[in-house]
Amino acid sequence: MTLTAGSATTTAFDLGPARALSCRECGHQIPLAAEFACPECFGPLEVAYDFGTVTRESIEAGPKSIWRYRHLLPVPSDVQSHPNTEPGLTRLIKADRLAAALGVRSLWVKDDTGNPTHSFKDRVVAVALAAARELGFSVLCCPSTGNLANAVAAAAARAGWDSVVLVPSSLEQAKVLTTAVYDGTLLAVDGNYDDVNRLATELAAEHEDWAFVNVNVRPYYAEGSKTLGYEAAEQLGWRLPEQIVVPVASGSQLTKVDKGFTELGKLGLVEPTPYRVFGAQATGCSPVAKAFEDGHDVVQPVRPDTIARSLAIGNPADGPYVLDAVRRTGGALAHVSDEEVVEGIRLLARTEGVFAETAGGVTVATAKKLIESGQLDPDAETVLLITGDGLKTLDAVSGRIGPSATVPSTSKAVREALAARGL
Ligand SMILES: *Cc1c(COP(=O)(O)O)cnc(C)c1O
Ligand SMILES: [Zn+2]
């Protein structure tokens, strides 16, 4: 409960180190609350902190999940941690075979398919839920391009909350089923993500106890993406990679990975070495990459048309901040065709044994393109963020891959089929 509106730091909420919400445009601060737009200029709000002392040792002694970073997140200091059900501490893979295929010296794959609902969205939802509970909400909601729907419905089920999820009705069947199974309310809307988002924003204004994770509690939700940056740095032995490639939908993840790296440097948890942030989009929904190519600061909204549905946000809220982060760090943005996305999925699977969803295909294929164009330095240590699981986007590869041969159940037929492959 807010005590006085006059003092930006007076609040009775325990959201750990979070002290206020601060406008990304004008810097105006308001007390912690379920607000997302600046009362002065309508700019987006983000969490401002007052960090205490955080050491590598205190983090390493924490839970084996994102909650090891709770003293860097807008969540209660005694955030409820349930072992084995929380997102985070996913594997960082030294990707030597993919590195060889791409012609780079040192490459890592941060494999976020290992989260509870198999995408990085479990991170942002866990933080949103913890903050929403403290802010007094009791229903967990979202508009979603798919993975967020899974994460919200599952987290609500685990917490014993009701959930309300809105998705475009064109969503992959797998993502509809893997949301519906948790038995919340799931509305398939005949429209695209941007329509769904607009409807959700209306509902958020009408229902006081509904926390739309990426609308009215978005400032808290967004901070969850910092944990991808924290983890990559911790798993590299407490240092920053020189380059990181991040898929871009709303752009929130990219801006928060950058924020996470900067915070680690400021807090003395890593050497503040320079790093470059790269953004990856599918050509069929590449408003931010196009703005980068054209040298614009303003992102022109587009109507998405790509198999990378998890990234299909035509009007990305964080677009301008993505451009800022990429330009400030000396990175770049690029986009790849759906054909290249599928090739990216297959290349990652073939070289590293990791089956990514279309967003992962976008990241791998964009990295390849950036290397070929000379924008990504092949001699610099690079991390690729693989943010979702291929089992959820089987449509992208079905019809293109399958058994090497289908044979009768005789030894002769099996031997012949193997021989045909030179085996
Ligand atoms: C949502 C999503 C992203 C990007 O999220 P933003 O923060 O909106 O840019 C990346 N990968 C996957 C698999 C996603 O579901
Ligand atoms: Zn403002």
Image (cartoon, rainbow, N blue to C red):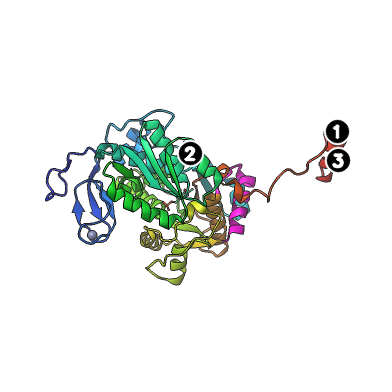
The residue singled out by tag 2 in the image is 180
The residue singled out by tag 1 in the image is 411
Q: Earlier in the sequence, mark 2 or mark 1?
A: 2
Give percent across and percent down for residue 42: 25, 60
Give percent across and percent down for residue 118: 50, 40
Magenta range is: 337-357
What residue lies at 41% left-to-right and 61% top-to-bottom? 315
Q: Is residue 356 left or right of residue 278?
A: right
Report the amino acid beneath label 2. Answer: Ala
Q: Earlier in the sequence, mark 1 or mark 3?
A: 1
The question of residue 73 being in magenta is answered with no
Instruction: Using a 10 Å C-alpha cutoff, classify the residue at mark 2 as few (fewer than 14 neighbours), some (14 to 19) or many (20 or more).
Output: some
The question of residue 344 being in magenta is answered with yes
Q: Give SS at disc 3.
A: helix
Instruction: Using a 10 Å C-alpha cutoff, classify the residue at mark 3 as few (fewer than 14 neighbours), some (14 to 19) or many (20 or more).
Output: few
- Quarter of the displayed picture in which ligand 2 can be seen: bottom left
Q: Earlier in the sequence, mark 3 or mark 2?
A: 2
Q: Main secondary structure of the magenta part?
A: helix
The residue singled out by tag 3 in the image is 416
Report the amino acid beneath label 3. Answer: Glu
Please determine whether, in this image, residue 184 is positioned above or below residue 295. Answer: above
